[in-house]
Amino acid sequence: DTLALTQSRSRARTERRAFAMAWYRTMQMAQMKRITMASKESDELHRISLRFVVAAAESAFTRSLSGKLAKSVCFLCICGSVCMGVFLTTVCWDTDCHGDEDEYRIFLYCRAVDMSVISFVLLVGALMAVQHNWHILNDVTVELITLVGCCLVVVCAPLTEFGYMSAFVGYVPHEGHIHSDDAWLLMFIDCIVTGSHMLLPMRWCMLWPLEIVAVLVYPIVSIWSDQQYGYPVAKVLTLFLLVILSASGKRQAELREREAFSNVLAERTLRALSEFELEQHRGRTASSPANLPAEEACAASLRSGGTGGTGGTGGTG
C-alpha cells in the first residue's frame, strides 16, 4: 500500500509538472513569436517621415536621443549667446546713427530685440541644463521646445536689421544708409538651420517646420517691407538651396542611424530567442527519466529490490 501510494503521488506530481511545463512553453513560444514579428516590423520605416512603423521602436529611438539633445542644446545656447553678445557689442561700437534721433530710436529697437533673443536663448539653455540633470520633461517635449526656440529666433531675426525694423515702425531711412544690407540676415538664418540639422541629435520628422519657416521668412518680410535690396530672387534661391542641402544631409544621416538602431534590436531579439531555446532544452532535460524526483527513484529501487529477493528465494528452494 505504501509503495502504491508513493507511485500514485509521484505520477500525479509528474503530470502536474508536465502540464505546467507545457503551458509555460506555449506562453514563451507565443511571446517569442510576438518578439520576432515586432523585430521584423521594427526594421520598416515610413518613406517620408523616416519613423519606425512600430511605436515601441520609435519611442526607444527617441529616448536614446533625448539625453544627448538636452546637452547639445545647452552647449549651443551658450555659444550662440556669446557670439550674439560679441556681435551686439561690435554693432554698438561702430554705429553712426547718433546724430539722427529717429534712426537712433530704431537702432535701440533693434538692439532691444537682440537682447530679447539673447535672453530667450539663455533661458532655453538653462532649461535644457535642468533637463539634462533631473529629466523633468519627456522626450518629445524636449524636441518641441528646441524646435519652437529655433523657429522663434528665425522669425525675430529680421527685426534686428535696421531696414526691416524701419519698415515695421513706419520710418523711411535716407538713401544709401550704411545699414541697408541684409546679407548677414541670410547668413544668420542659414546658421540656425545648419546648426540644428548638423549638431542637434533631433529626428528629421521634427525639423521640417523649421525648414519651412526658414525658407518663407525672408521673402515674406522682403515683400511686406518693400525694401529695395540687391538681387532678392537670387538670395531666396540660394537660401532655399542651402536649406534643401541641410535637410538632405540630415535625412541621410538619420537613415543610417536608424539602420544601426534596427541592427541592435535584431541582435537583442536573437539573444532572446537563443535564451528561449536554451530554456526549452533545460526543460526537456529536467523532464527526462534520468532526472526523476526522489519518490520515483525510491519506488524504482524498491521494485528492483523486491524482484531480486524473490528470484533469490526461488533459486534456493
Image (tube, rainbow, N blue to C red):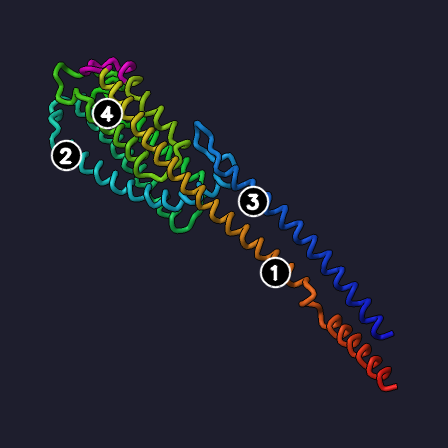
Question: Which element is circle 4 on?
Answer: helix
- In the picture, measured across the screen, residue 297 lies left or right of residue 95, that is right
Image x and y of residue 237, in percent: 26, 18
Badge 3 crowding class, 10 Å Cα cut-off, few under 14, some 14 to 19, many 20 or more, is some
Disc 4 to disc 2, C-alpha distance:
19 Å
Answer with mark 4 or mark 2, whichever residue precedes in sequence: 2
Q: Write down the region rendered in magenta.
A: 222-233
Label 2 belongs to which residue? 90
Q: Up-down: is 177 above or below 6?
A: above
- Decide which of tag 3 and tag 1 comes sooner along the chain: 3
Q: Nearer the viewer, residue 124 or 206?
A: 206
> Sequence-wise, which precedes: disc 1 or disc 4?
4
Mark 1 lies on a secondary structure that is helix
| Callout in the foreground (3, 1) | 1
Residue 282 tag number:
1
| Badge count | 4
Distance between the alpha carbons at the discs numbered 4 and 3: 49 Å
Asked if the magenta segment contains residue 230, the reply would be: yes
